[in-house]
Image (cartoon, helix red, strand yellow):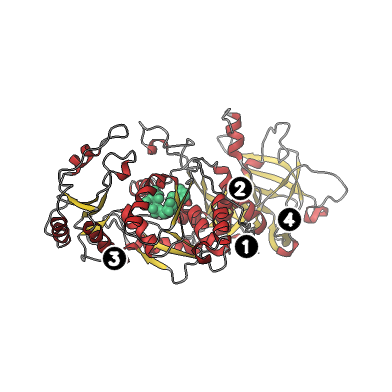
Amino acid sequence: MTTDKKETAASDFIRAIIAKDLRNNKNNGRVVTRFPPEPNGFLHIGHAKSICLNFGIARENPGGVCHLRFDDTNPSKEEDAYVQAIQNDVKWLGFDWGDKLFYASNYFNQLYEYAVKLINMGKAYICSLSAEEIRQYRGTLTEPGKDSPYRNRSIEENLDLFSRMRAGEFAEGSHILRAKIDMSSGNLNMRDPAIYRILKVSHHRTGDKWCIYPMYDFAHCLSDSIENITHSLCTLEFEDHRPLYDWFLDVLKVHHPQQIEFARLNLDYTVMSKRKLMQLVDGGYVKGWDDPRMLTISGLRRRGYTPTAIRNFCRTIGIAKRENRIDMTVLENSIRDDLNVLAKRVMGVLKPLKIIIENYPEDQEEMLEVANHPKNPEMGSRMVPFCREIYVEHDDFMEEPPKKFFRLGPGREVRLRSAYFITCTRVIKDDNGLVVELRCTYDPASKGGSSPDGRKVKGTMHWVSARHGVRAEINLYDRLFTVENPESDKDKDFKEFLNPGSLVTLKDCIVEPSAAAINPGQQVQFERQGYFCLDSTSKQDNIIFNRIVTLRDTWTKIRKKQGVKQ
Ligand code: ATP
Ligand code: MG
């Protein structure tokens, strides 16, 4: 069963452009997109937006293709482990690049040739200013830059220096290759940008073959061109780089993909750059890239999100031309919607309170049939053991219940889901006056939880047999940050806003036996408590569940109470 929602050609402005291009037979009716991650960290939910867009468009159009290309031009930050993790995440999200797996590093020879060509055309030169001097010469947004004193080096000298840079004769930072464009351009990217720099670093794929590496802006647009990409979709911050890409492609007279920019995903209560996520991992603020609180794809997977929910989320937020922020509730609702349909209902008690049903025979046990889904009989039912001793949720009992509390209290009768009506007859406390146990009686005529004589009870509670229940550890997650935008205060480090209560682990939970028998990664709904997923590290003698999300959105309510505008 799938709950995937569908895209149409008119879903967003990018799909509309592509549909028009196809109608006009532009690119001979081909649609070739790409997803180009830099392998310097794990993918996050923002990347999912780009993946769904690029792979989605390829899938929707007959003959469409999407390449997975690693933009691996910065060897000091990149690792093969990230390459593997990224592939794993893209596949898990449900997308397939077929045989179109590429690396910018595959093109290092070609890119070098392009650079030599620019030098030969008098369009690039070796600059020997220091990094600091280059910054000073660049000017500002309001002041034009100054020409480098090395700008007019001869083509021969440039060719000689460039080949010696490649041969490893010079130290890092002593020379760079720059495009010769316009130091007075209003666009800083056009002020003779760097094309190649010396980096004496081994590359995870090319080893020590190179000690000069192309800059991202040079490698990116030309890799798109080499791969015959038709539509190069990128986030808005690259709008200002487009004139530079146009310049490279036009001067070199090579295939010119159409670049279209869209707004990146910004999500409340989280940070979204690999660099910042890495700080959380390296600083031990979270337990690894796949910590269920991280909005990485691997974190969401471990938390129990489904690929369908993430794809539907990306579809819901759409593709816009303007920057915006998305409320976390939108993401949470996407997993609620998916699991509401798919997740089997089971019973688990997070904070157990023991009940002894005094009129239920000591040596009796019975199996009661409980539906697996309230609305979908096709999901069947299961047999759940019941006996004289059960656990209910501590929060479902109050000694002096207020008016609107319909659950258990002294002398009150409630329904145990699919079991019996019980009435609380006695409250047992410890030396500190804390309630530790309840004594109840049950009505044998209410088997299955139906009223024997039309009398009504207001509350229905979940329960687990104390003799048969299985002990489990449950992780309850809250948002990782306490403020909507942890990056908005430029004077403060985003880590100052980490939520100290983002993880609460309950050690003594009791779940029904069928819940403990599910597979790691599988999701269930613990009735009334939310959706949970058996953690990947869970073992038979140490069962661990992660709460994916509560059943309802409690945050919006809390924020409304605090007077925060929605
Ligand atoms: P980060 O800052 O997290 O490292 P990035 O853009 O530098 O992000 P890349 O690996 O270069 O990371 O990104 C691969 C692709 O994913 C790019 O095409 C980029 O535009 C896209 N992408 C990255 N972050 C987002 C986001 N928040 N929303 C939409 N697309 C994104
Ligand atoms: Mg990047």
Sequence-first disc among 3 and 2: 3
Outermost residue toward the left in this view = 169
Which secondary structure lies at badge 2? helix
Q: Which mark is residue 110?
A: 3
Q: Label 4 to label 1, Cα distance in Å? A: 17 Å
Of labels 4 and 3, the one closer to you = 3
User: Mark 3 Cα within 10 Å, few/some/many (few <14, many 20+)?
Assistant: some
Q: Nearer the viewer, residue 306 or 227?
A: 227
Q: Label 1 to label 3, Cα distance in Å? A: 59 Å
* Residue designated by label 4: 374
Sequence-first disc among 2 and 4: 2
Of labels 3 and 2, the one closer to you = 3
Q: Label 1 to label 2, Cα distance in Å? A: 26 Å
**Amino acid type assigned to the residue bearing label 3 in the image:** Gln
**In x, y percent, where is residue 530?**
61, 49
Q: Nearer the viewer, residue 496 or 52?
A: 52
Q: Label 2 to label 4, Cα distance in Å? A: 19 Å
**Amino acid type assigned to the residue bearing label 1 in the image:** Ser
Instruction: Tell me which residue sits at (34%, 52%) in the image.
Output: 247
Which secondary structure lies at badge 3? helix
**Amino acid type assigned to the residue bearing label 4 in the image:** Pro
Outermost residue toward the top in this view = 563
Which secondary structure lies at badge 4? loop
Relative side of 351 to 272, left or right = right
Q: Quadrant of residue 427?
A: top right
Of labels 1 and 3, the one closer to you = 3
* Residue designated by label 1: 514
Looking at the rendered image, the quarter that the C terminus falls into is: top right
Q: Label 3 to label 2, Cα distance in Å? A: 47 Å
